[in-house]
């Protein structure tokens, strides 16, 4: 059986974490408020064992295409977010860039200074889509504003790369600005690993023909492997993840939160240490 690099988790200047695993996963053909065939975790969450945690943290062949980095954002940067009042934003709040453009530019300069040591390639510029605000206490927070529906587990395609070079996509930064813990949900399979498990004998041409759509790939994979589980990684206030969101199924979760889910995002080729 062909070996693909497996999902790996690295803690960078961050406290120890408790990772949980879902009991099951389900494709919802028609769930109110969600797109058709939304994929969501089902049942109770259980803490993974110490051996499972060690396995997640010590995979070989880890790189930016299969590694999730959890890191602590410096206090001086969090202070700049606080000066802009980010922790108190709601879904109806104005764009923070319009609130104080000078302070926003100062924030971006500080973020660039912090992340510059993580940039993997020369001349790679980090971009910042900015603030996203989601409803509290939701299993899954990603929202398609054009359809006004929640998405569920998904694979991003910002770089619009095909299956041959999807593992060369930029990874994503997501900083938790809200005062409560949020979660990163993900399935421990990379894009091409799922393709191989579905059809190990497929040629590259067949893979490109049948599996260039990440949504269709994910639905087919979960249909064939219904006992696939989702892991849940806590991201505390002032922490961030850097993850290959164009190469692994994932979503954010605001479950148990009493206030809005507030994040600040960025994208780039980043590998912390």
Image (cartoon, grey):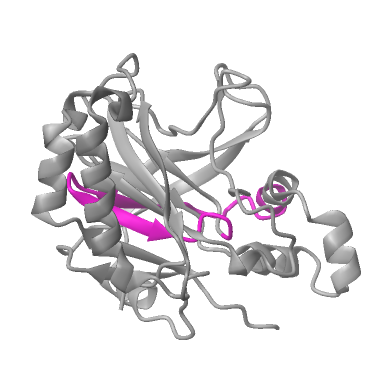
From the top left corner, tell me how far across and down residue 172 is, in percent.
Answer: 44, 54
Is residue 237 found inside the magenta-colored segment of the image?
A: yes
Q: Position of residue 25 (x, y in %)?
A: 54, 44
Res 51 → quadrant: bottom left
- State whether residue 202 is above or below residue 82: below
- Is residue 241 a member of the stretch shown in magenta? yes
State the residue at coordinates (25%, 62%): 113
Confirm whether residue 213 shows in the render.
yes
Residue at 55%, 78% in the rendered image: 5
Q: Look at the image and tell me in which quarter the C terminus lies.
A: bottom left
Between 230 and 81, the one lying in front of the other is 81
Residue 253 spot, x, y in % from top left? 37, 38
Q: Nearer the viewer, residue 18 or 134?
A: 134
Q: Is residue 128 left or right of residue 145?
A: left
In which quadrant of the rendered image does the N terminus lie? bottom right
- The answer to which image quadrant residue 95 occupies is top left
Q: Which residues are magenta?
A: 221-247
Residue closest to the far top: 92
């Amino acid at each position: 059986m062909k070996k693909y690099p497996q999902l790996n988790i690295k803690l960078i200047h961050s406290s120890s974490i408790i990772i949980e695993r879902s009991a099951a996963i389900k494709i919802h053909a028609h769930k109110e408020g969600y797109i058709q065939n939304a994929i969501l975790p089902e049942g109770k969450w259980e803490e993974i064992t110490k051996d499972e945690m060690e396995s997640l943290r010590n995979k070989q062949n880890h790189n930016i295409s299969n590694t999730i980095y959890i890191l602590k954002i410096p206090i001086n940067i969090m202070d700049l977010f606080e000066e802009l009042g980010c922790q108190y934003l709601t879904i109806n709040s104005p764009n923070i860039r319009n609130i104080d453009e000078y302070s926003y530019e100062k924030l971006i300069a500080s973020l660039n200074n912090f992340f510059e040591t993580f940039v993997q390639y020369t001349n790679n510029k980090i971009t910042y889509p900015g603030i996203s605000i989601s409803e509290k206490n939701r299993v899954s927070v990603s929202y398609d504003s054009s359809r006004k529906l929640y998405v569920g587990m998904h694979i991003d395609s910002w770089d619009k790369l095909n299956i041959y070079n999807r593992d060369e996509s930029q990874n994503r930064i997501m900083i938790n600005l809200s005062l409560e813990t949020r979660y990163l949900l993900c399935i421990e399979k990379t894009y091409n690993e799922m393709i191989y498990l579905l059809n190990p004998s497929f040629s590259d041409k067949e893979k490109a023909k049948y599996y260039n759509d990440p949504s269709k790939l994910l639905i087919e994979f979960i249909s064939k492997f219904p006992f696939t589980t989702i892991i849940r990684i806590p991201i505390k206030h002032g922490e961030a993840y850097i993850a290959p969101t164009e190469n692994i199924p994932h979503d954010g979760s605001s479950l148990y939160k009493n206030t809005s889910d507030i994040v600040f995002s960025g994208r780039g080729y980043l590998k912390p240490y």
